[in-house]
Amino acid sequence: MAAGSRRLAAIMFTDMVGYSALAQADEATALEVLGRHNRLLRPVFEKFRGREVKTVGDAFLVEFDSALDATLCALEIQRVLREYNAAAVDRWQVRVRIGIHVGDVVETGGDVLGDVVNIASRIEPLAEPEGICISQQVYDQVQNKVAVPFVRMPPQDLKNIRVAVPIYRVGATVPARPGAAADRGASGGRHLAVLPLSNISPDPADSYFADGLTDELISVLSQVPGLSVIARTSVIPYKSNPKSIDQIATELKVDTVLEGSVRKSGNRIRITLQLIDVPTQGHIWSNSYNREIDDVFAVQADIADRTAEALRLDIARRSGMGTRRVPTENSQAYEMYLRGLADSVGFLVKDATDAARWFQRATELDPNFAEAYAAWGNLYVRMAGDFAPLREVMPRARELAARALALDPESSDAHSTLGNIALQFDHDWARSREEFERAIALNPNNVDAYRYYTLLLISLEEFARAREVAELNLRLDPGSQRYSPVAWIELEMGNFEPALRNLEAERDREPTRVLNHTVLGFAYLAAGRRAEAVREADTPLTDPDWDSRFDLALLNALVGRPEQARGVIADVEGGRGTGYTSDGYLAMLYAAIGEKDRALDLLEKDYREGDALLWLWYRGIFFDSLRDDPRFVALIRQ
């Protein structure tokens, strides 16, 4: 192309965080880090067909033919650097900010000029360390092509740019630091917690309606692009343990809270809500709705629109919550559905059975109720392996998900269910990935999809990507996941110290929870620190649930104390266990106490009958005694 010619291009600026300070303090180290930075980034530019225009010190200017290539390249850069930094000592770590804009450029003497270059250079400093910022023009081209969240910032006044420029943060996978209101406010009010609605109905038995409606509001608001909504499993504890708005915001890392109450009397409902800005404690908006139950969907749509408008989210780019498909015209079916949602939160075996019954009743009352089919199928997926054999619940879950998709092809929950079935039951990794990515694209707040997608990536040993997805899930569901999934991935990667630090912090945060001690004990064993594992195995069994007893018995068996494990085995085989224990899990106990043939018999039976637990746990320390056995090797190959 001739010098001075004009063309459309995407421009990326990258800049290393903290390089100037490092250069002043230790020039030799700074030059070594810069060399590592260049060696890490340049292959990624080439992979996505980026042309390195120039480098100035620790900054790159790179040109791409498309905004999509530039965005995918930026995401890959941050992934590569996170993986590198996880294994690097602090002084060698490389962290960059990235900014991208698209527009006309003019090439002169191998350089590129134009407003697009100036704007991209001004956007880059707005990114957080290890972050990416893009302009509105880039967002318009990539929003439906990249399965990561986009968070819109308030319009930015950029130096020497005449008009304010809308900017988006891309793929924020690192949880924000806890606490500071300034950090929360910096997101522009894009992280929302819907607190459990208070039930002020005359009949206390109507609490299911408030609980189910809370879940529905979370689901509806999750469909608003640019709005990160905390999952129900993380907000439900505040129903029985209320705290101040500021405490909740700090714990959940949100800057906006929606709270309110519900009064149900016959077929009439009164919903009172207020959206609160955490840093100022002021009401962004508040409203009361006095309606018939039949109007509840219009109420939900209005709440979503008010919230989006108040937080300055781009309503024009949404499909329109006000025109959201009405899930059912049958108010009784909707009440059955809400009962099912309420019963599926705690997820005890009894609750799961009750929830399934409510979902079944909802679909009997309205055979075209897609959301009820999807929730019912997802419930069975969550039961599989831990509460019921896969061979019993997965075929039924498949039927329900297929029915949901026939009625609503854009059901994120149904796609997530199919992804899990492909993962756990069919062992079809490609189909599983496709379904999970589709579920997340349809609803970037779908925590179940993130959770199970993480398991797929661990199974495929794509650990760096697994950590990204686990951190996204942790951001959306900080209460239920804590740090264990990320720590698990660190252990799989051989990064023992960060994993142990996370698990030790979780144990110290909630020291009476037996699970925290057993998980840490398993991690100590994986890291070769037997003495610390023995200390965790000495934890008294204070939790009454079956899972706690099983895990503590397994840990004790692994440190050479088989008595508890033999007791659990006797109860399971004698029909006295208070929870479901699959043959695969029972095999863990037998392997831990050294009865290898019995463990292998159970694993082979588990495989024949369709549960096939080994896809997830075959690397676990509980199977170390079987590792070289030909029967175990054959099972892994199968």
Image (cartoon, grey):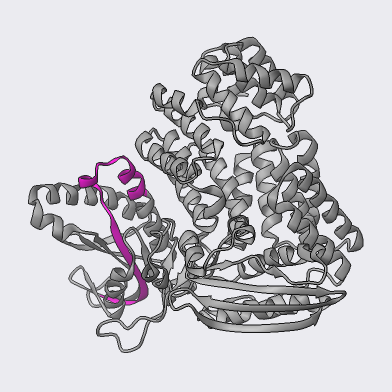
Of the 4 image quadrants, the one containing the C terminus is top right
Residue stretch rendered in magenta on the structure? 80-106
Q: Position of residue 35 (x, y in %)?
A: 18, 48
- Which image quarter: residue 107? bottom left
* 231 lies above or below 151: above
Q: On the picture, is 593 further left or further right than 572?
A: left
Q: Position of residue 259 (x, y in %)?
A: 61, 72
Residue drawn 52% across the image and 27% down it: 620
Of the 4 image quadrants, the one containing the N terminus is bottom left
Residue 398 visible in the picture: no
Q: Position of residue 570 (x, y in %)?
A: 72, 17
In magenta stretch: residue 97 = yes
Residue 342 visible in the picture: yes
Residue drawn 74% across the image and 58% down it: 342
Q: Position of residue 299 (x, y in %)?
A: 72, 79
Q: On the picture, is 120 further left or further right than 435?
A: left
